[in-house]
Amino acid sequence: MMPISQARADASPPLPFREGLGVGSDGQAEPVPAFGSSRFALTPTPNPSLKGRGAEGGFTLIELMVVVTLIGLLAAAVVVNMPDPRGRLSQAGERFAARVAAARDRAVVSERPTGLYVSASGYGFESYADGRWEPMSDGPLAAQTWPDGVAVSAGGQAGARVAFDALGLPDQPVDVVLVREDERVTVALDASGGVVVR
């Protein structure tokens, strides 16, 4: 018969153990497999806060708050960058300046005075012929209205009239100021006939 100590040595398990780390159901110490063992199974410890939820778990309150915050920031960025359906005020100013320059050039080419009038509702151009001013009703110099919500002042007044002579020089310089909410555009007509948007 084989001595007990030799039998224990021959019957030692093939896996390394760490003695005395586990306690069995009977309260006795029992060997626990070392962490490097291939038989060591990591089993998740049940979390009572996840009761009734699937294995995937769910979102925490902090994760939901982060997502809601990101959505809010993206929505704010979209609203800020969304173009105004009324069009940009600077575009209205540039169109007005281009038409004023065209009226000035028309006076030079036709060798006839050409007039500009500005009011709170819009602007237009006039042609001088047979001793009187006639409004232009067709083409690019036809009467125009200002975009919605635009307040206009010309030289500090509600309106103004300017006449270009045959050399393209205005009878007076004038600054036409367009204002809508926090936007402000000035179209400056100087004494030499130059038109500048600023």
Image: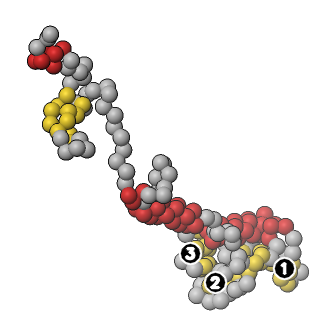
- The Cα atoms of the two marked residues, 2 and 1, are separated by 23 Å
Q: Residues within 10 Å of mark 2 (few under 14, many from 20)?
A: some
Query: Which residue corresponds to the image point at 74% horizontal and 66% vertical from the top-left?
Result: 102
Secondary structure type for disc 1: strand
- Quarter of the image with the C terminus is bottom right
The total of numbered circles placed on residues is 3
- Dot 2 or dot 1: first in sequence order is 1
Secondary structure type for disc 2: strand
| Residue 183: assigned label | 3
- 149 and 177: which one is in front? 149
Task: Name which residue type carries label 1.
Answer: Pro
Q: Quadrant of residue 93?
A: bottom right
Query: Which residue corresponds to the image point at 82% horizontal and 73% vertical from the top-left?
Result: 142
Circles 3 and 1, Cβ within 8 Å, touching? The answer is no
Circles 2 and 1, Cβ within 8 Å, touching? The answer is no
List the single residue furthest toward the top. 1
Q: Quadrant of residue 24?
A: top left
Q: Is 136 on the left-hand or right-hand side of 158?
A: right
Query: Which residue corresponds to the image point at 73% horizontal and 74% vertical from the top-left?
Result: 165
Q: Which residue is mark 1?
A: 135
